[in-house]
Each structure stands twice: as C-alpha cells, then as structure tokens.
Amino acid sequence: MNPRILVVEDEDKISDLLRRGLSYEGYRVDVARDGQTGLNLARDNPPDLVILDWMLPGMDGLEVCRRLRSGGPVPIIILTARDSVADRVIGLDAGADDYMIKPFSFDELLARLRALLRRASPQSPEVLKFADLTLDTGTRRAFRGERAIDLTAKEYELLELFMRNPRQVLTRDVIFDRVWSYDFGGESNIIEVYIRYLRQKLEGENEARLLHTVRGVGYVLREE
Ligand code: CA
C-alpha cells in the first residue's frame, strides 16, 4: 500500500498543487481545508504523514498539530510563511517534525517527506533496552520504567539512534547525518533544541540523567 498523506491547507492553489503532485508521485492524498476536517480525516483514515498549514481558518495549525500529536507519532510537516527562529521553535514544540517556509520548492518538500517516511517505517520490530529505558521499534513507544514517554517522530529517531549506540559518544555530525539527512537551512542549533526536548521527556524529577553532553564533541547515552 502506498503511503497516505493528509494535506491540511486552506489555500486552493497550494492544496491543488500538493494533491496533484503527491498523487503523481504515487501517494494516496486526502485534503482538508480546515483543522477540524483534517482531524476528522486523520481519525477515519490514519495518515502516514501530515502536511499542515500553520495559518488556517478556525483552529490554527499549531492546535491541529498538538491534537494530532496526542493521537500518536505520525510525522508532521508544517507549512508556514513565518520565518523567525522563535516561530520555528514554537512549531517544533507543538510536535511538528519539520517545516517548510512558503513559498517552498515541491522537490524539497518531497525530499523531506521521503526522509520522514523512510524513518517512520520500521524494519523488523525490536525492543531496545538501556538502563530503565525501553523502546519498542514496532509500536514506536518509549518507556522509562513504567512511565510512557510521548515522543514526536524526530525525538523518537534521536532516541533510537542513542539506544542503538549506548555508551558511545555520538558527534553532532553523526547525529545530524543520521537524523536529518538533508540540509536544514543552516539551523545549526537544531540538535541542541532536540536534545533539550528529549531530556525534558526522558528525565523526570527524580530520575537520573541518561543523555550526557560531551563538551565540544557531542552526546552520549550512559548511566551516571
Ligand atoms: Ca493558510
């Protein structure tokens, strides 16, 4: 079955372009013109990836993103005309995995979409364990002890990379190459931003630090 892409976009020109372009590439495409319709479609036909406009009538893209995210780890690309780093971080905080600034190149969107889909499709499921962390690559669920950890698709990939390479220092270059295979537009602090997200989720109040910074080199998953 070809991947199903949900497009939530109120501008007809863009949604038509995406519907035609993505269908031509072999994807199954659903289009919604507003957030609520998008959420309904996502519930009825769970998509493999969502392309979500930020500025929507009624419920905005960020709220749609949060609600989609609470339903599971579907990759989400946000389309936005907003360009400041602060706005991008808000989008990532809301659970988006990537964003494209309008006007965007369709080829670049395709490249990012393929990268996200490739990473989202599990090979043979495994249960990875380190200390009291458990990662199920089949269900893409993470636990610390009994506590379920709610991860975005990118956070999941980052954690999986560390859990497949425990006690090894991973350089920023390696992390960038493995988790973001394309040019992120010079967003050089993206790894720090994601490490911070991951720590907030992994390391609760009375839980020991597992993700350590190796100054000037990178990061390592190890016990204290
Ligand atoms: Ca719009």
Image: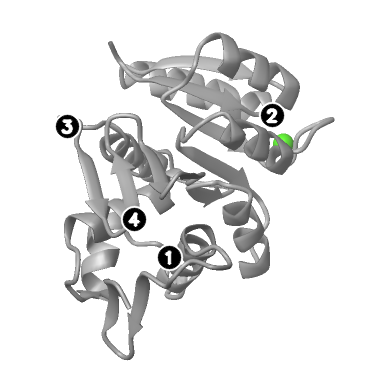
Q: Residues within 10 Å of mark 2 (few under 14, many from 20)?
A: few
Give the CA distance from mark 4 to mark 3: 24 Å
Q: Earlier in the sequence, mark 4 or mark 1?
A: 4
Which of the 4 quarters of the picture holds residue 212? bottom left
What is the C-alpha distance between the residues marked 3 and 1?
Answer: 29 Å
Q: Earlier in the sequence, mark 2 or mark 4?
A: 2
Element type at mark 2 = loop
Residue 41 occupies quadrant: top right
Q: Amino acid at mark 1?
A: Gly
Label 4 beta carbon less than 8 Å to ligand 1: no
User: Which residue, given by chain and number where applicable, does mark 1 sit on?
Assistant: 185
Q: Which mark is residue 123?
A: 3
Q: Earlier in the sequence, mark 3 or mark 1?
A: 3
Question: Would you name the residue on which mark 2 appears?
Answer: 11
Q: Which residue is mark 4?
A: 132
Q: Is residue 187 above or below residue 58?
A: below
Tell me the CA gap for discs 1 and 2.
25 Å
The residue lying furthest to the bottom in this view is 216
Q: Report the Cα–Cα distance between label 2 and label 4.
A: 47 Å
Residue type, label 3: Gln
- Whether residue 180 is visible to the viewer of this picture, yes or no, is no
First of labels 4, 3 by sequence position: 3
Q: Nearer the viewer, residue 82 or 164?
A: 164
